[in-house]
């Protein structure tokens, strides 16, 4: 029988609704990041850099792009005969087939997959965070403590603690209590959604709690282990970790990559981030182009000006166009004379000549102010912004829009323009 010391289960089924139109056609872990990567590349690269060579990726929402990106795992050296990477969507069973209803339910539905490797430990990961972490160090800590479950935690500012699952630990780091999103937090150790379980402990908890609706780690599995008296420990992580679950945090994390001394460095030799790369020609900068403090992906042609921006692969930035503080994803076209300020332009979108995005004063977005804020302009995948229009801040455009959709060639700050059927 195959025997693996530790296997990883990577939860990548999330819709990521707070990313608005960026995730209307693609799962959050497959969203582009940093000019050439996708968000899921970070936990996958962490696995292979930590010596974890067996990873089950649990997909659900809009999995096509994710599945084709992961393929058989070649970029991460995860194309193994035994182990490697396996994409695990929900599947038809002979009785009561169901979607994954909660994080732990997704793991429960794949007990057989985990059983087949007879692991000592199971590492549970989430597919939507940007960080570098050595899971082997966490495993060593787990063994030293004699833990049955170790939860990676990170100190957060006390005023933000109510957004997280909060762990209360004694001086030995053993978890004594935890609170899911407490109104008045008593600790600032936030769960990162990264767990190492002894396999027997995890299996027992999943089987016992299987009938709970929307079976979840924070709400059901960890409380169950705690009540049974299983030793639970907090593993404190002090490196860079970013939940890119909102448009603003996603924009911010990209912008942090181009800081003079980036807190999160994509260029480290010893901890590489691997991704599936297309065979693209090198970047091209025309004689008139100007670029400063930016990441420019392969195959991109720049004829205009780019400042403080993250530009993906195969992008065209036309003559006289000015792109500032923006994220332009793969395959997008920014026509001549266009001006973009604090814009997020999704893959294969098209911004017409002399269009101006991110102009004027801010106003709250009229349909989803909790998503479209901080002055950003968001343009969805394969969307078209016609030539010559002016677009305000906290706006969102999705679909193939035409001049007639912009009264007086203007979309005011805070407006939403989503073409039906797109």
Image (cartoon, helix red, strand yellow):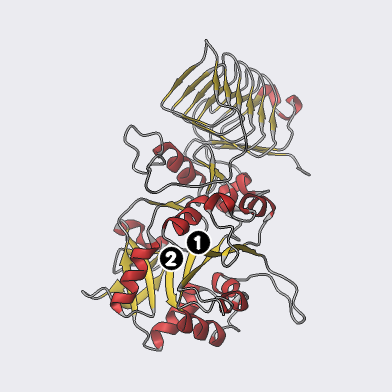
Q: Is residue 190 visible?
A: no
Label 2–label 1 contact, CB within 8 A: yes
Residue 377, how many percent across, how many down? 56, 34
Where residue 419 sits, quadrant-wise, is top right
Quadrant of the rendering where the C terminus is positioned: top right
Secondary element type, mark 2: strand
Residue 375, how many percent across, how many down? 49, 35
Where residue 1 sits, quadrant-wise, is bottom right
Residue 64, how many percent across, how many down? 69, 53
- Whether residue 86 is situated above or below residue 121 in the rendered picture: above
Residue 13, how many percent across, how many down? 61, 61
Secondary element type, mark 1: strand
- Whether residue 254 is situated above or below residue 412 in the rendered picture: below
Q: Residue pushed farthest top?
A: 287
- Whether residue 96 is situated above or below residue 235 in the rendered picture: below
User: Quick one: 417 or 329, which is closer to the camera?
Assistant: 329
Q: Which mark is residue 126?
A: 1
- Whether residue 143 is situated above or below residue 261 in the rendered picture: below
* Residue that badge 2 annotates: 194
Q: Is residue 49 visible?
A: yes
Where residue 97 sits, quadrant-wise, is bottom right
Residue occupying image coordinates x 57% and y 54%: 16
Residue occupying image coordinates x 38% and y 68%: 182
Residue occupying image coordinates x 32% and y 80%: 146
CA gap between label 2 and label 1 equals 7 Å
Q: Earlier in the sequence, mark 2 or mark 1?
A: 1
Label 2, residues with CA under 10 Å away: few <14, some 14-19, many ≥20: some
User: Quick one: 81 or 142, which is closer to the camera?
Assistant: 81
């Amino acid at each position: 029988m195959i025997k693996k010391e530790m296997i990883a289960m990577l939860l990548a089924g999330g819709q990521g609704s707070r990313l608005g139109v960026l995730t209307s056609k693609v799962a959050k872990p497959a969203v582009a990041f940093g000019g050439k990567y996708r968000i899921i590349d970070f936990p996958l690269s962490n696995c292979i850099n930590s010596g974890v060579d067996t990873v089950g990726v649990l997909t659900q929402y809009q999995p096509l792009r994710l599945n084709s990106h992961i393929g058989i795992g070649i970029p991460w050296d995860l194309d193994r005969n035994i182990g490697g990477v396996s994409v695990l969507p929900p599947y038809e069973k002979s009785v009561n087939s169901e979607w994954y209803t909660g994080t732990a339910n997704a793991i429960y539905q794949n007990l057989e997959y985990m059983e087949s490797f007879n692991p000592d430990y199971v590492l549970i990961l989430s597919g939507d965070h940007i960080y570098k972490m050595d899971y082997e160090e966490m495993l060593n800590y787990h063994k030293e403590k004699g833990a049955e479950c170790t939860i990676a935690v990170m100190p957060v500012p006390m005023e933000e603690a109510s957004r997280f699952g909060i762990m209360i630990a004694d001086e030995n780091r053993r978890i004594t209590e935890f609170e899911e999103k407490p109104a008045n937090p008593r600790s600032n150790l936030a769960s990162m959604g990264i767990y190492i379980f002894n396999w027997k402990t995890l299996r027992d908890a999943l089987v016992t709690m299987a009938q709970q609706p929307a079976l979840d780690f924070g709400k059901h599995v960890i409380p169950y282990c705690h009540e049974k008296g299983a030793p639970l420990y907090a593993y404190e992580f002090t490196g860079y970790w970013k939940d890119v679950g909102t448009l603003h945090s996603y924009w911010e994390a990209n912008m942090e990559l181009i800081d003079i001394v980036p807190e999160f460095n994509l260029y480290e030799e010893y901890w590489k981030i691997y991704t599936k790369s297309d065979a693209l020609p090198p970047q091209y900068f025309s004689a008139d182009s100007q670029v400063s403090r930016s990441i420019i992906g392969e195959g991109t042609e720049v004829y205009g000006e780019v400042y403080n921006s993250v530009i993906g692969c195969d992008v065209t930035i036309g003559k006289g166009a000015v792109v500032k503080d923006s994220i332009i994803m793969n395959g997008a076209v920014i026509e001549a004379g266009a001006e973009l300020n604090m814009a997020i332009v999704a893959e294969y979108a098209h911004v017409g000549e002399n269009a101006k995005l991110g102009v004027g004063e801010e106003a709250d977005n009229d349909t989803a102010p909790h998503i479209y804020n901080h002055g950003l302009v968001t343009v969805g995948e394969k969307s078209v912004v016609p030539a010559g229009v002016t677009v305000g801040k906290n706006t969102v455009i999705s679909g193939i829009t035409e001049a007639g959709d912009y009264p007086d060639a203007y979309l005011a700050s805070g407006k939403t323009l989503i073409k039906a059927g797109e």
